[in-house]
Image (spheres, rainbow, N blue to C red):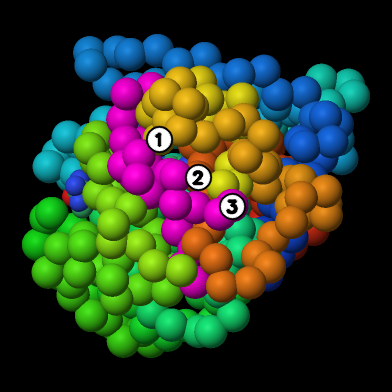
Amino acid sequence: MPKILILGSKELEELLKPEVLIPEIENAFIKYSRNETVTPPRTVMWVEGNWWGVMQSYVPDCGVGVKVVSLIPQNPSRGLPTIQALVTLFDGLNGSPLAVMEGGVLTALRTGAASAVSAKYLAPKDIGPIGIIGTGYQARYQLRFVSSVYRSDEVVIYDVRSDQMKTFRAWAENAGFRVIEAASSEDLVKKSKIVIEASTTKEPVILGKWLSRDQHVISIGAHAKDYRALDNEAITRFSKIVVDSRKAVLDETGDIRIPLEKGLIKQEDIAELGEVSAGYRKGRESDELTLFKSVGLAIQDAAAAALAYRLAKSKGIGIELEL
Ligand SMILES: NC(=O)c1ccc[n+]([C@@H]2O[C@H](COP(=O)([O-])OP(=O)(O)OC[C@H]3O[C@@H](n4cnc5c(N)ncnc54)[C@H](O)[C@@H]3O)[C@@H](O)[C@H]2O)c1
């Protein structure tokens, strides 16, 4: 019987460093935008008022990855993370199950890597503070990965929960960042060169009237049809809107679906990250205001899981179990 490899969060943190994961995720986006992957839309179900997703993809040279993920915003008060998940990896040719992995850390790592790829092509030239709205679980990974590309050691933070800001501040200072606490998201946007939105908000926390030229905004929240992290004015002010997947953002976030339906932006205005990476669409050209909006794609999970599997096998890391 084939053996299955089990990897926990500690092993994944050790294996998936920014310098190895970012190029892998960038390649997966290029394959996605060239239609080389098989990526059906994720199945979303609402269970007891909470979002669950089943996400599957075949990425050539990586295999088939399937993730089951839940998002329960009340979980931090229970001492549990908002996002919990399991990822399974299969051989894409013979179908053998290869690995099972903790999916919460894997999700945060691959989401950080996607934001870092966006910074590689869209970040302003001048180095200034990185702002983060929502200092929960994703925030650390966003800062670690984005700052590995956009080498700022200054971070401006804002969260509606002061305890979250305090915990994040201690972590960031320990990691070598100078931390500035903003009084509001408006204050944060006005002080930052890169603005990362990593919150569980349903209402806009980034307004167009606060933005200025020569900023790059990364928004990973607002994962449902009617949720917004950015207002309509913000969406119309960006000179470039880059997304992880045109289809997924249209289906899954109010930030893109609503302005499109209102005719405020056109589909042709929206580029995919893989198209920018492959050179089909342009990255930053001058002092401009740019957006990377992601909802998360199964290709990222499959690519990250395959990389973790290859590295773990070569280093003898993880537990192997005969099925
Ligand atoms: N795009 C992707 O690929 C991807 C992947 C993973 C998570 N996410 C999204 O990232 C977001 C954050 O996830 P998490 O795991 O860090 O959750 P979390 O609960 O750990 O952190 C969210 C933080 O946002 C704060 N917040 C809520 N409303 C706010 C507001 N109006 N202003 C400022 N702060 C506010 C909360 O207090 C909390 O500290 C979620 O929306 C999740 O769906 C996206």
Identified at 46% across, 33% down, the residue is 264
Q: Is residue 57 visible?
A: yes
Q: Amino acid at mark 1?
A: Asp
Q: Measure how far apart labels 3 and 2 are at the Cα level.
A: 11 Å
Specify start and end residues of the magenta stretch as a single range.
Answer: 214-240
The answer to which of 26 and 33 lies nearer the viewer is 33
Question: Residue 216 colored magenta?
Answer: yes
State the mark number for residue 293: 2
Residue ID for mark 3: 240
Identified at 76% across, 46% down, the residue is 275
Which dot, 3 or 2, sits closer to the camera?
A: 3
Local packing at callout 1 (Cα closer than 10 Å; few below 14, some 14-19, many 20+) is many
Q: Measure how far apart labels 3 and 1 are at the Cα level.
A: 15 Å
The answer to which of 61 and 130 lies nearer the viewer is 130
Q: State whether residue 260 is above or below residue 217.
A: above
The answer to whether marks 3 and 1 mark residues whose Cβ atoms lie closer than 8 Å is no
Res. 305 image quadrant: top right
Q: Amino acid at mark 3?
A: Lys
80 with respect to 2 (left or right): left
The answer to whether marks 1 and 2 mark residues whose Cβ atoms lie closer than 8 Å is yes
Residue situated furthest right in the rendering: 93
Q: Secondary structure at mark 1?
A: helix
- Residue 66, given in percent of the width and then of the height, sits at 62, 26
Q: Secondary structure at mark 2?
A: strand
Local packing at callout 2 (Cα closer than 10 Å; few below 14, some 14-19, many 20+) is many
